[in-house]
């Protein structure tokens, strides 16, 4: 029987009369807050599968740091991203689509984020899993005038061909 759904009948009060115990004294596990329920499931799962919890928590912390960095880049939080990069976050880290911070900056037309990532050593010609570079994104999303021009000036390769067989300039837009 699953303990999360079991409440001994002796503990359940059926009368409506004044009880000497408070209603909060009895605990039914299925009413745990979702985060606590998840933590209990993970703990028991780790114990059953003999998983090293400390290494798992380290991996989770790393995943949170990556998600945080990409969220900061997407939403234009330049100071916080700069602080994260100063703390040692690798600017060439990839998200689940293979995008790096400069790809995200180009997608969102955020030159400030792009400059911060490049200043911390981001590869200007990095490509995602579909073969698109930051320059591809600048042309595709209509920021070729500002972002694309800046990338070319900083040495971006305009001859990178993505999986669709297209160069950045094939998306249109003038620099």
Image: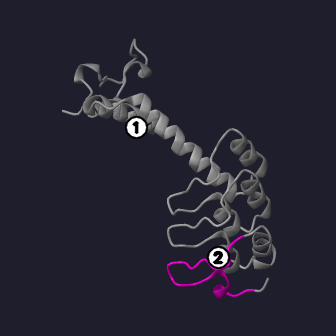
The numbered disc on residue 140 is none
User: Quick check: can you spot residue 44?
Assistant: yes
Residue under the point 50% across and 59% down: 96
Residue under the point 65% across and 63% down: 104
User: Quick check: can you spot residue 32?
Assistant: no
Q: Secondary structure at mark 2?
A: helix
Tell me the CA gap for discs 2 and 1. 41 Å
Residue under the point 29% across and 20% down: 11
Relative horizontal placement of residue 99, taking residue 141 as reference (left or right):
left
Disc 2: CA contacts within 10 A as few (<14), some (14-19) or many (>=20):
many
Q: Locate the C terminus by quadrant.
A: bottom right
Q: Nearer the viewer, residue 18 or 32?
A: 32
Judged from this view, the residue extending furthest toward the top is 20
Q: Is residue 134 above or below residue 88?
A: below
Q: Nearer the viewer, residue 116 or 44?
A: 116
Disc 1: CA contacts within 10 A as few (<14), some (14-19) or many (>=20):
few
Which comes before the other along the chain, label 2 or label 1?
A: 1
Asked if the magenta segment contains residue 172, the reply would be: yes
Which residues lie in the magenta part?
156-173
The residue indicated by pointer 2 is 136
Q: Residue 4 at what x, y percent from top left?
A: 29, 32
Residue 16 falls in image quadrant: top left
Q: Residue 66 at what x, y percent from top left?
A: 57, 48
Q: Is residue 126 above or below residue 131?
A: above
Q: Is residue 39 above or below residue 101?
A: above
Q: Residue 75 at what x, y percent from top left?
A: 70, 57
Q: Residue 174 at what x, y percent from top left?
A: 77, 86
Q: Nearer the viewer, residue 2 or 147?
A: 147
Relative horizontal placement of residue 131, taking residue 104 as reference (left or right):
left
The residue indicated by pointer 1 is 38
């Amino acid at each position: 029987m699953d303990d999360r759904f079991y409440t001994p009948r002796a503990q359940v009060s059926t009368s409506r009369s004044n009880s000497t115990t408070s209603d909060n004294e009895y605990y039914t596990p299925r009413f745990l807050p979702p985060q606590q329920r998840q933590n209990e499931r993970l703990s028991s799962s780790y114990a059953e599968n003999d998983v090293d919890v400390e290494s798992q928590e380290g991996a989770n912390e790393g995943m949170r740091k990556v998600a945080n960095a990409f969220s900061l880049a997407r939403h234009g939080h330049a100071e916080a991203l700069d602080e994260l990069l100063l703390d040692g976050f690798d600017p060439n880290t990839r998200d689940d689509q293979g995008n790096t911070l400069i790809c995200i900056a180009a997608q969102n037309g955020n030159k400030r984020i792009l400059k911060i990532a490049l200043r911390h050593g981001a590869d200007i010609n990095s490509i995602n899993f579909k073969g698109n570079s930051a320059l591809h994104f600048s042309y595709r999303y209509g920021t070729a005038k500002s972002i694309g021009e800046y990338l070319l000036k900083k040495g971006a390769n305009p001859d990178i061909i993505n999986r669709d067989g297209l160069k950045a300039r094939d998306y249109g837009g003038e620099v």
